Structures are given as C-alpha cells and as structure tokens.
Image (cartoon, rainbow, N blue to C red):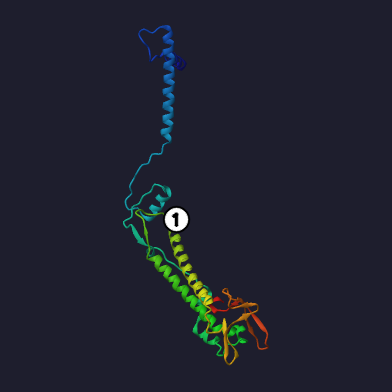
Amino acid sequence: MILNIVNQLYRTFLQFNLFKKSDSTEQTLRKELIATRVYICSFITSLIIITIITAFIVRTIETTESQPSYTRFIQLAKQYPSTIQCPCSKYSISYQAFVTTQVQFHPVCSSRFIEQTWFDMTFMNEDISVQSIDDFRVTLSFFWQTVGGLCNASRASWESAVANFQTSNILSPTAIAEETLRVQVQAVFQNQIDLSQTTVIRTLLAIRRMASGNQIVSGLQTNYYLKFFSCSDIRMTPRMFGNCSCTNIEGCPRPAIFNDSQGHLIIIPGMIMDCLIIEA
C-alpha cells in the first residue's frame, strides 16, 4: 500500500510540468519537465537554507522587571551580562556612600620611637664635633624626630587622598555589575594613591636637591662645620667620610655606628647615616 503511494507520487513528480504550453512538442516537453524539476529542487533547497538560517538567528526579546531586588539583579546580570539594562534613580553617587578605606602604615609610625618621651630619652646635650659626628647617638633624637615628621606627612597625604576619593562621584545612568564596579573603584582609588605618593616623593626630592645644591648648612653640622685655621681664618668645611665629601649631591650614605665604652665602633644593623638626616 505504502509502496504504491510512493510510486504514484514519483510518477506524478516525473510528469509534473509547471511550464507546459498548448503547442508543446515532444522536444519542448522534455525541456519543460527538466526545467520544472530544476525549479522544484532549487525551491526546496532555498527553503531548507532559509529555515536553517532562521533557526540559528538569536531573537532578542525585551522584558521589563520593575524594582528587582539586589539578589535578582545579580542573577539577571550573570544571566544577561551584555544586554541587561537597569536605569538608576540617581545618575551620580559619591564613593564614600559605599566604599570604606583602611591603611596600615609602617609599624614605626605607631611605635614609641616617634613619641616625645623617646626624643627626650635619646637626646644628648653635648656639642657635636668632628670626632663625635660618627657616633649615631649624637643625632639619634633628631633622627627619630625626622622619622616622626615623615610619618605625619604620610598620614596627611593619605587623608588627603582619601578625602579626594570620597568626594569624587561615580557617574552611570544604569546599574553596574559588582565586579565591574569593584575594578573601577580600585582603579580610581589607586590613581589617587599614586598621585599622593608622587607628590610626597617629589617634595622630599626637592628638599634634598635644594639643600645639597645650595650647600645649605645643617644646624647639626652633619654636612658642614666651622674649621678654625687661625683666629682670622675660619672656613665652612664639608664633612668627609672616607673618600666621600658632603659636597656630593648624592650625599655619603654609610652604616650607622656608635662608640662603646671601650672605644670600639659598633655597627647598627639596618640603619643608615648620611650628610643630612632627611637622607638617612
């Protein structure tokens, strides 16, 4: 039964003629049948191609969800990262509304070494001479006062960077995914930190260059001292440490030492002396 139906359809297909004319001859009839078969095959092939292409086309369907919760927004953002749009009620919001900052300074900045009590304990009330300048204890109190000043400058720089960051606003007409927002916040904050660090470093470098270039004499006489050649010949003489002179713009860095009770020179590990305390 089925085989008969198939044979009948096949014979019908072979005899089907879309281009039949009333005056068709045997020769033209053959051409009309071939043209019909080519047309039908081409039509079916084109229809299959169009169907396949249509099946693979991604159709975007827009749906609106009113006032989704934070959890729902995160879910939608993960599911549709490139197409989700969530308009904000406010286009601008300051970073301090959702960002908190913490900083950890060098342990010395929170130690007793930068307290006035320690300054007083380490202060040596004696004149600085050519012989005593090598003893780090002579300038130790001033050294720690300088360190304390640098710690205060660092704190002020950090507070300024945080204040500038917190008063800055993030602008966006639509909600931003958490990871994207995190990357953006870190980039903006790191830029503020880098700017703050650059400002501090440039200030310290300018002080060092100005002091060395203009041969400014330290009140502690650590870079220059008065040398009496005679009563009428008094000269400001640069300090010499080995083969290095404090006229050198790069200074004369060397290990910090002190004289013990027996006159031995003891090196203090991890501490450096220089012509100016700020360079130590």
- For the point 49% across and 70% down, the residue is 202
- Residue 89 sits in quarter: bottom left
Mark 1: amino acid: Glu
Badge 1 density bin: few <14, some 14–19, many ≥20, Cα 10 Å: few
Q: Is residue 280 above or below residue 164?
A: below
Residue with the most extreme bottom position = 231
Residue 189, given in percent of the width and then of the height, sits at 44, 63
- Residue 243 sits in quarter: bottom right
Per the image, the residue denoted by label 1 is: 179
Residue 224, given in percent of the width and then of the height, sits at 57, 82
Residue 62 placement, left or right of 272: left
Q: Give the camera-side residue of 162 and 214.
A: 214
- Residue 20 sits in quarter: top left
Q: Is residue 68 above or below residue 227?
A: above
Residue 212 placement, left or right of 176: right
- For the point 43% across and 50% down, the residue is 78
- For the point 44% across and 31% down, the residue is 52
Q: In which quadrant of the rendered image does the C terminus lie? A: bottom right
Residue 70, given in percent of the width and then of the height, sits at 38, 55
Q: Secondary structure at mark 1?
A: helix
Q: Is residue 114 above or below residue 83?
A: below
